[in-house]
Image (cartoon, rainbow, N blue to C red):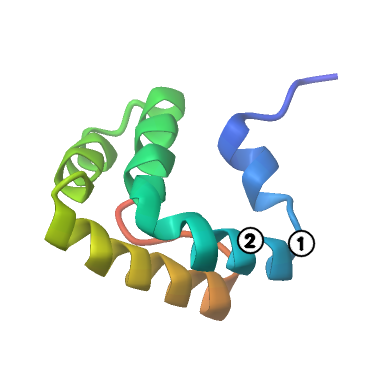
C-alpha cells in the first residue's frame, strides 16, 4: 500500500479541522510551510516561488486569509499550491 504524502494527509482531514488549523495557526507561516512541503512533493517551481514570497510578513497575512477562504470554499488550499 502506497504511503500518503504529508499534504495528502492534511487534505484528508475533516473540513472543520482544516479550517480551525488555518484560523488559529495559519498566521504562523503555515502558508509558506505548506507550499514548501508541496514543492518537495511536486517539484513545481511556481509553488517554490510562492512559498518564498509567503515568508514575507505582509504577504504572509494575505496568503493566510486567501488560504482560509479557499479552505472554506473548496476544502483545500488551491492558490499557488499545485
Tell which residue pokes out farthest to the right in this image: 1
Residue 22 vs residue 11: left or right?
left
The answer to whether the residue labelled 2 contacts the one labelled 1, judged by CB atoms less than 8 Å apart, is yes
Relative image position of residue 44 (x, y in whole percent): 30, 33
Task: Write the residue at 44% across / 58% down.
Answer: 26
Query: Where does the N terminus fall, quadrant-wise?
Result: top right
Residue 26 vs residue 6: left or right?
left
Relative image position of residue 78 (x, y in whole percent): 42, 60
Q: Residues within 10 Å of mark 2 (few under 14, many from 20)?
A: many
Determine if residue 72 is in view. Answer: yes
Pick the residue in front: 62 or 44.
62
Determine if residue 82 is in view. Answer: no
At mark 2, the secondary structure is helix
Read off the residue under disc 2.
18
Relative image position of residue 15 (x, y in whole percent): 70, 67
Task: Write the residue at 46% across / 26% down.
Answer: 41
Read off the residue under disc 1.
14
Up/down of 11 relative to 9, above or below: below
Count all numbered tags in the image, as a single digit: 2
Amino acid at each position: 500500500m502506497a504511503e500518503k504524502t504529508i499534504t495528502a494527509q492534511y487534505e484528508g482531514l475533516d473540513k472543520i479541522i482544516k479550517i480551525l488549523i488555518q484560523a488559529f495557526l495559519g498566521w504562523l507561516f503555515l502558508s509558506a510551510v505548506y507550499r514548501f512541503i508541496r514543492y518537495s512533493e511536486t517539484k513545481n517551481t511556481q509553488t517554490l516561488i510562492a512559498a518564498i514570497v509567503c515568508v514575507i510578513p505582509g504577504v504572509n497575512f494575505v496568503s493566510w486569509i486567501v488560504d482560509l477562504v479557499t479552505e472554506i470554499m473548496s476544502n483545500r488550499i488551491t492558490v499557488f499550491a499545485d
